[in-house]
Image: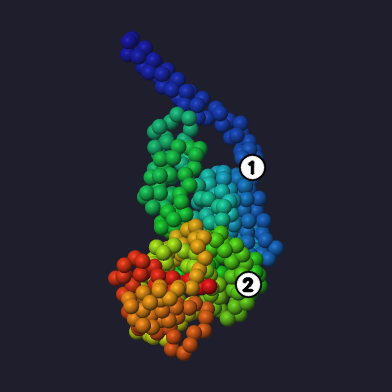
Amino acid sequence: AWRKHGARALAGAAGLAVLGLLSVNVAPRLVEMAALLVGHDPMGTATATVSGDGRRLHVKGPLGLGSAARVRGLLDASPQLRWVVLESSAGRLPEALKIADAVRARGLPTRATGDCSGACPYVFLAGSRRQLLPGARLGLQRLSAGGFNPPYQGLVNRTLAQRLAAAGLSPHLVTKTLATPPPRAWYPESDELAATGLITLPDRPLDVELPGPQGATMADYAEALSASPLWQALEKRFPGVQALAAEHMGAASAQGADAVQSAGHLVVAALLPPLLVQASPETRWLFTEVLLAQMKALEGDAALCRNLLLGDPAAHRRLPRELAWREAEWLLGALGESPRGTPARRPNSLELEVIRRTLGLRAPQHLASLWRPTTMPPEGEPDCERGRAMLAELGTLAAPQRRLALRLMYERE
């Protein structure tokens, strides 16, 4: 008898446990589940629109029930699409995965213009190339299995980890995502996203994702520039530089992609002299070290090295990739530095005599003509072989003499 009563008690306890789990995990969602059964999603449905030129599909709002059908319909009806543009902070995973499959099948790049969290990252990461525009953030979020259901939550976490890894997240990013309690989202920094390949970096730091050459407008080039962290930093220090670069790039569009990228680079080359005039001595020396490394890389081609010193983008594009990125790292640091308030001034006779005695009688003239981007110096200047030797010797000088030499190189009246 006691066995019979024990079995009944055990069954009763199990039933109560099931009812408890249902009351915690299912009961609060009954209204939502009923609405979904009749085709209405309380979360809402994303708006999906195609831009007037047919190049961009804008998806905005929660990726609720019906969003995938709406987006896939526009994808099928819009053969000229070049971008899928996202802004969504909520959504249902099945809908997001359907949209992601459709985007992946078309091989389209994705671009976030605002908050992309919840289910949105699955669509974003399906892009053939991925960009975050200024103000956009990618939020990675763990799914919840309900109010109290540890075994099922563990299963959900394992499944989610597999999906995140398949989407391209590194093990570190997967761990950080799963460690963030819902409903909060974790927003990795841009450099972390770039290092793990979740946002696309160009082969060259000043290059941008170009619009199609046919029908491209100044706004298209400006939008492409605004997606680059380096061009964002340039715009912050030199307002209007993106618009100027877009104008130059648009003018070069008929000459091919390489000419378009070079046109943007030429705008930056013209900004380096004023940037270095206002830079600290330490920042000037860091640039000199970069410049010397670049000159050494082109040691076998005197003409190419000379063109590099004159700010020629074509010569710059011949540099090893790692040197181009090393310069970009320097440039980001220089752009973030507070400008010096001390105006440029001509070295006095005593300072010139110090340089002559330290580096040679004609050292002031050689230093002043060594680095002259976007100018036309006399024939034969600058001399790369002499310049490499002189820059190497600067590293052996005491700090006061070196600062003086850098003034001769970089300060312009």
Q: Quadrant of the N terminus?
A: top left
Q: In this picture, is 2 found above or below 386? A: above
In the displayed image of the protein, which residue is found farthest to the top? Answer: 1
Provide residue 390's location: percent of width, then percent of height. 34, 78
As drawn, the label of residue 247 is 2
Q: Nearer the viewer, residue 113 or 251?
A: 251
Compared to residue 238, the image places residue 317 above or below, namely below
What residue lies at 60% left-to-right and 78% top-to-bottom? 252
Q: Quadrant of residue 359?
A: bottom left
Q: Residue furthest bottom?
A: 379
Q: Nearer the viewer, residue 138 or 110?
A: 138
Pointer 2 local density, CA inside 10 Å: few below 14, some 14–19, many at least 20: some
Compared across the picture, whether 54 is left or right of 232 comes to: right
> Quick check: can you spot residue 324?
no
Residue at 34% over, 81% down: 360
Q: Position of residue 207 (x, y in %)?
A: 50, 69
Q: Residue at x 29, y 71 (%)?
A: 396
Q: Is residue 145 above or below residue 278?
A: above
Amino acid found under the numbered disc labelled 2: Glu
**Tally of marks:** 2
Q: In the picture shown, does residue 409 fall above or below 99?
A: below
Q: Is residue 43 visible?
A: yes
Sequence-first disc among 1 and 2: 1
Check disc 1 and report the residue beneath it. 44
Q: Nearer the viewer, residue 310 or 42?
A: 310
> Which colour scheme appears in the figure?
rainbow
Q: Which mark is residue 219?
A: none
Tell me the SS state at disc 2. helix
